[in-house]
Amino acid sequence: MFICLLLILAMFSGASIISQKYSKKLSTLLSSVKQFINGNNGIDSNSELINNIRGCETPIQTLYDCLVKFSNSLNYEVDIYNPDNSNAIKECLEIMNFLTLSDVGLENINLNNIGQSACMSILSTDKFELAVFILPKGLSLPLHDHPNMSVLSKVIKGNLQVQGFSPIVENSNYYMYMNDKKFQLNKVLKLGDELETIATDNCVKSVQDSAWYLSPNRSNIHQFKALETCVVFDVLVPPYIYPNRPCNYFEISSKSTDERFTLKVIPEPDSKLPVAVYYNGYKPVESKFLSETEIHEHSSTN
């Protein structure tokens, strides 16, 4: 196994397709493997070698591993509604701050002549989805929601105008009380339904800004406009699923104050939606973590 790894690394270490970003890490890893094979005592196969291999991963792999652990944890459903208090979501956001265009297989030069919004799905499970959106300058993602979902976002190119609305859940026919002052959308919306909301976001996000999130109760309905060509990395927790958790589209029906808006569900605006394109960036390697339930059950039997 290690001989194969050495041959592969030796081949790639001289290849022009490996960016300067990873050449030093590859060199370190190659040296470590050589030491291991030669029986030198300068490396522990269970620690340093593994750490060096992990050092060659992109943030996407680290993010994926974090999401797998999170989705298998006992706090998964609770944290979706309480992202403010979630260490797992905080860790994911911190990892997303290291994402770059090269991680998702894009370069600035390839984005100059794009005239249509596009979406690249990296992967999707029943617990989370990773996706990349490309918005050419002047184009928008129309006003839409994420029913009973949290979404983590990071701009990795451009300047993005974000406008968000939080549903007014108290005394609403569409929401039911859960706990800790959190509410859950308890029915699938239909065309013509109206939601009372408060405008909670109206800002510009750029590459320099940290990753951010929306939750089921805060800024869950939003729209984007690209002030210049933008690339946005999204994590949906959990993903959309039809017909129980569809994406709904809205228009502003009325405005009662500077902050309070009535939003009406409208048909899907096909002409404004991104087209699906092939993803050619880094694809995470499957992780196999025991869930906390499995760990507990395993411990109980021993």
Image: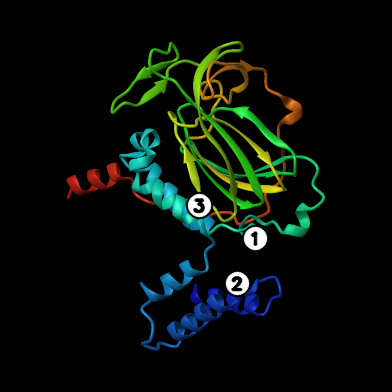
- Is residue 71 toward the left or the right of residue 20 in the image? left
Of residues 35 and 164, which is closer to you in this image?
Answer: 164
Residue furthest to the front in view is 258
Question: Tag 2, which secondary structure?
Answer: helix
Q: Is residue 13 above or below residue 214?
A: below
Instruction: Kindly check if marks 2 and 1 are in contact, taking CB atoms under 8 A apart as contact.
Output: yes
Amino acid type at mark 3 = Ser
Quadrant position of residue 86: top left
| Residue tagged 1 | 102
The answer to whether any part of residue 275 appears in the image is: yes
Q: In the rendered structure, find residue 21 and report the number of the disc placed on it.
A: 2
Of residues 77 and 263, which is closer to you in this image?
Answer: 263
Q: In the rendered structure, find residue 210 and report the number of the disc placed on it.
A: 3
Specify few, some or many for label 3: CA neighbours under 10 Å numbering under 14, 14-19, or 20 or more. Answer: some
What residue lies at 29% left-to-right and 45% top-to-bottom?
292
Of residues 84 and 241, which is closer to you in this image?
Answer: 84
Amino acid type at mark 1 = Ser
Q: Upstream in the sequence, badge 2 or badge 1?
A: 2
Quadrant position of residue 110: bottom right
Amino acid type at mark 2 = Lys
The Cα atoms of the two marked residues, 2 and 3, are separated by 22 Å
The Cα atoms of the two marked residues, 2 and 1, are separated by 10 Å
Instruction: Kindly check if marks 3 and 1 are in contact, taking CB atoms under 8 A apart as contact.
Output: no
